[in-house]
Image (cartoon, rainbow, N blue to C red):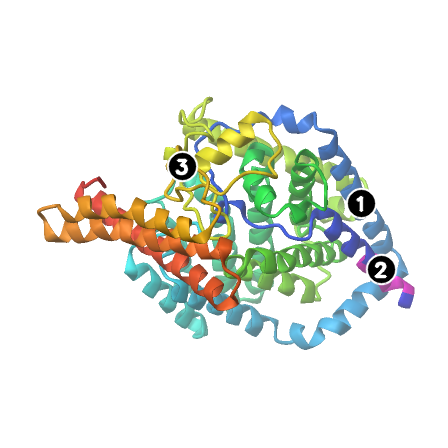
Amino acid sequence: MKHGWKAPLSLAALLALAATPAEAHVKWFAPYIVGAAPQPITATLTNPWFWTAIALVCVFFFATRLLEKSAAGEQTLAVMDYLTDPLAQRLDMFTRAVIAAFFIAIFAVGGVYLTPDLKTPAEWVSWSQLLIAALIFIRPLQPLAAVGIIGLWLVALRDYDIFHLLDYLALGIGVAGYLFLEASNKPHWRKYRFDWLRWGVAIALMWSSLEKFAYPEWFTPLVIEKPFLTFGMPEKVFIPMAGVAEFTMGFGMFWTPLIRRLSAMALLIIFTTAVYPFGRVELIGHALIMAILVSVIAEHSRDVHFMPALKRSLAGIPVGLAGTLILFVAGYWGLHTTIYGPAGNGTTYADAARTTHTPNAEHPHDAAELAAEMSSGHDHSSLPMPGDPTGDPTGSTMPDNAADAYAETMTRMHGPMMAGMANPDPDAAFVLGMIPHHQGAIDMARVVLRFGKDGFTHHLAEEIIAAQEREIAEMRAWLEQKGLQEP
């Protein structure tokens, strides 16, 4: 039994390390334009590192499946069952609790729909999240919570393109489906509840992983800001291999019990190691997925639903992976062309005015500067911090000392703030003056993050940036509703 469980766990650890130890959702931290034309899929299919990663994953799946078919495979699963049994006996309680906790967390954050990049100024959205959490604790009312989750996604369509929301739809349907089935008194329905949850997460991860192939330039800001993520690998090697890791581990959660549990384990390692470098935004945003991965690891079921004969054969691995990849690639590129047209919506990555990204403390680079740097083909390691965090593409570098940098923040703030407060409408004057005032606070916070050394001031600066950026987004939404423009 000892040798039976060490081999697959070692494979999972090796795969997780190869996949990259910290992998954040790029839209939360970097500039992006969903409507821009994606890179042709041929660029990925002709990339040797893409196929290298595919080969490594296939070896992992083949080795795991061979082990699973042997007596040692059942021993391995038995050991995993033993280690997770305390949780498995309370798995529904755990799953319901973490789903409720997630909605309480995003209620506490405020100003978001379902994830950090889906922002909203509507206060009622946050209160509905608290109501969803409360409904989950009352088992007969769980179907209402499920309806509420799908309802939040539908409301988000008012503010975001449907293409942007598709990966969140898969996750939302997975969670909603679990809540509905878990509350059912019909055993032939209820037995599929964890399958539904697992499939929802797997589809969401596979769909979002395609961004690394369609828009590899979105990931350059993360590589610039946190070069340690690549372990010294060149950007063009790291990004396709990270995309393959995320896609194939998602695919693995559809497969046989040992493969899906080890795939979930590898993904959990990846997401857990992303928490420290990316902070609380990463933790809150991925907490639900991480908890579901724990559920997949702890589930003792040996059932294989949907095409079990294919999944149990070794030949089914490459056939299933190829078919799934073709289906998702065709869906991603096909839907994008259908919604935005062959040339996208006319935007490019360098069109910073159309970006939906709000810079933050950890990733302060402005979109135009990043785009220009990336398109130049120069080394990214010396990219300067922009002097104008508001997104002015003409922004200069930040001064070399704190005193000058602080003075520059006040100089930038004063003119727009006074111009805004000159509006004859007192409500409009308040908002138009407050936006540059808040931006001035954000700029000051960025100065202390660069020059300051004290942990308290760094923490305070990060809190100020998060709060002020959310309020700026709310004020700009109000201006848009009123048909007003900033001076």
Measure how far apart labels 2 and 3 are at the Cα level. 59 Å
**Quadrant of res 44:** top right
From the image, state whether disc 1 or disc 3 is nearer to you. 3
Report the residue marked by disc 2. 73
Asked if 462 appears above or below 428 in the picture, the reply is below
Residue 75: x percent and y percent? 85, 66
Residue 8 part of the magenta segment:
yes
From the image, state whether disc 2 or disc 3 is nearer to you. 3
Image quadrant where one finds the C terminus? top left
Give me the residue at 63% from left, 60% from top: 272
Residue 102: x percent and y percent? 48, 65
Asked if 377 appears above or below 124 in the picture, the reply is above
Asked if 167 appears above or below 379 in the picture, the reply is below
Report the residue marked by disc 1. 313
- Magenta region, mostly helix, strand or loop? helix
Q: Which range is magenta?
A: 3-9
Give me the residue at 89% from left, 61% from top: 71
**Quadrant of res 56:** top right
User: Badge 1, how many Cα within 10 Å: few under 14, some, many 20+?
Assistant: few
Residue 354: x percent and y percent? 38, 34
From the image, state whether disc 2 or disc 1 is nearer to you. 2
* Foreground pick, 104 / 260: 104
Q: In this view, does 133 lie to the left or right of 260?
A: left
Give me the residue at 47% from left, 38% from top: 32
Report the residue marked by disc 3. 395
Measure how far apart labels 2 and 1 are at the Cα level. 15 Å
Amino acid at the residue labelled 3: Gly
User: Secondary structure under badge 3?
Assistant: loop
User: Badge 2, how many Cα within 10 Å: few under 14, some, many 20+?
Assistant: many
Measure how far apart labels 1 and 3 are at the Cα level. 58 Å
Which residue sits furthest left?
Answer: 424
